[in-house]
Image (spheres, helix red, strand yellow):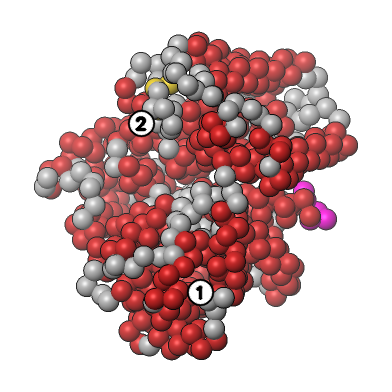
Amino acid sequence: MFFSVDLLMQGFGAALSPENLLWAFVGCFVGTLVGVLPGIGPSSGIAILLPLTTFLPPTPAIIMLAAIYYGAMYGGSTTAIVVNIPGEASSVPTALDGYEMAKQGRAGAALAISAISSFVAGTVSLLGLTFFAPTLASFALYFGPPEYFALMIMGLSLVVSLAGKALLKGLVSAILGLTASLIGQNPLTGACRLTFGCEDLMAGVNFISVIIGLFALGEVFCNVEQKVTYILDNRKIEWMPKWVDVYRCRWVMLRSSVIGFFMGLLPGCSPAVTTFVAYDLEKRLSKTPERFGRGAIEGVAAPEGANNATSSGGFVPLLAFGLPTGPALAVLLGGLMMYGLQPGPLLFQSNPSFVWAIIASMYVGNVICLVLNLPLVGMWARISLIPFPILGPLILVFSVIGAYSIRFMLFDVWVTLVFGVVGYLMRKMKIPMAPMVLASVLAQMLETSLSQSLLISRGSWSVFFTRPIACVFMALAIGSIVRGLWVQYKTGGPEALADGDD
Amino acid sequence: MRNLRSADMVCGACIGLLGLAVVVAAMNIPALMGERLPSKALPMLCGVLTAAGGFLLAIKAYRYDGEEIPVEWPDRGGWISLGVTMGGLIAYVALIELLGLPVASMLFVIGLVRYLGMGLMAGVATGLGTAVSIYLMIHYLALSFPLGVLGS
């Protein structure tokens, strides 16, 4: 429809010009740094750096902003793998296996497979963007609130799998995450709830605070208590993955690319959801699912691939309809509008050279990110060699900065501290943390889409089973729960008090 | 609380009580006209599920008769280290608005690095490096972090 080889070649011509290459490189580099810092995600990164691009013409400016976005997606896994601190919700599944790999001295291999998987997924989803953008963009328009609610229920059903053998503890963890997310104001009516008379709680609990508290602070508290000298016992680091590891992950990368790309087309479906879905799928498909959570390299490749595919997939509805699928792309949309460019079908016709230069630059940017990240693997992996008495306080300071930068409110920092203590206790009592994170990420969209669905259906719950897409997601959710319970029944006997997955 | 069974019983009971508190709080949420999903519905559901999950966890642990799994609580020295770190962190956050992020971070890092066993020079160098990095980040990216004694 809109695609032509000539236009794509012209786009590559523009993207490979020295000036645009330079800004793509700067964007990738800055984005990687932004991704590495806990709490400062791509949306904050783009928003902070948007004013700095005003001196550039539109094409290099948008190339740089897009590069910051996917550069941040590349960098987001670094701290999750090296020090068990996921800066973003989407990095939580990466931390589950990535940190275990780091503890086994394979931090370099985990970081490298994360970069390779991100590159593969980014490229696969860019092919989708190049050839099928307008067709695929219409897919997003079939999604109304009932479909989103069903999708969120499917996401929540992953708790059964994430909980491992300690199913009840996993469910309790997820319910606590949901309850915490309800604190504050009702997103539709503004009604105040669960604040127990405390005005500060009206601001609500942001899920980034939950993640930073549970993972970063909880981890530091455990290390402080044990008076460790280094965060990892194993100080021999494997810098690169073995070829056999990459080969083993080939289908994992492709599957997670497809999942990430299609889910990335949906507004509101953040990378946090797709990474959990991709991780869970690989765990279910694996012949040795017990390795997941204990340093399986597929457990790093899958979420990282899905993460980058989602971010590239989000450009389809953005460019084709002007529909941002997440906060970072909304800021990018603002950047486009700042330059007088209105994304939508007309943009492909009125400004083809601009659109195809951006798309081509993303191919180039993906290569830059890979070339930039592979040599940096050694540097990032060395973070774990810093003595803990220095690294621990630095992690705490960056956690505080990350929590504060969510909404520039000290309240978020206090919430992070509370969840730090919760994370410490959950580690001691072997309560899985991933279900709490998943539930707190999904909670707001779950509630909003449920309220909207019931408004549309005039209060009828059958809306989730009479609309085909919603019905499919509901069936998948029910199937996922039944399967999880069945597997546990078959393998378990009485439920274990503890499981080492987290 | 020395083994996981007793820890689960205490933890389950606490979560159950928290769930009951959420149920009580949810009952006080006023209903609004024309709502298809009452404002109190989800908080109430979560409260009930939290209470049920918590008490079920406690009961399951009470009835557990398998192998005893110890909880690895810290020794006395570990509790002291944990207490000092948490206390330092609370003091640090409380002082951020007064002293500003760079200075408060510097003092916190110097203090904790020293407490955790590194030399004074290492502490001061790390603290100063942290403060300068944060200040430059705030200054050049025009971020809205409190600067305290270093400016507005």
Residue drawn 23% across and 42% down?
B104
Q: Residue at x 62, y 49 (%)?
A: A276
Q: Quadrant of residue A462?
A: top right
Mark 1 neighbour density, 10 Å: few (under 14) some (14–19) many (20 or more): many
The numbered mark, 2 or 1, whose residue comes first in the sequence reads 2
Residue situated in front as seen by the camera: B151 or A194 = A194
Horizontal side, residue A127 vs residue A184: left or right: right
Contact (CB < 8 A) between labels 2 and 1?
no
Which image quarter: residue A133?
bottom right
Instruction: Give SS at disc 1.
Output: helix
- The secondary structure that most of the magenta stretch takes on is loop
Residue under the image location 34 percent in, 19 percent down: A198
Mark 2 crowdedness (10 Å alpha carbons): few <14, some 14-19, many ≥20: some
- Quarter that holds the C terminus of chain A: top right
- Residue A288 painted magenta: yes
Disc 1 residue type (three-letter): Asn
> Is residue A297 something that shows in the picture?
no
Q: Residue B68, percent across and down?
A: 75, 25
Which residue is tagged 2? Answer: A203
Residue for badge 1: A366
Chain letter of the residue beneath label 2 in the structure image: A
Q: Residue B138's x, y, as percent?
A: 22, 54
Tell which subunit mark 1 falls on: A
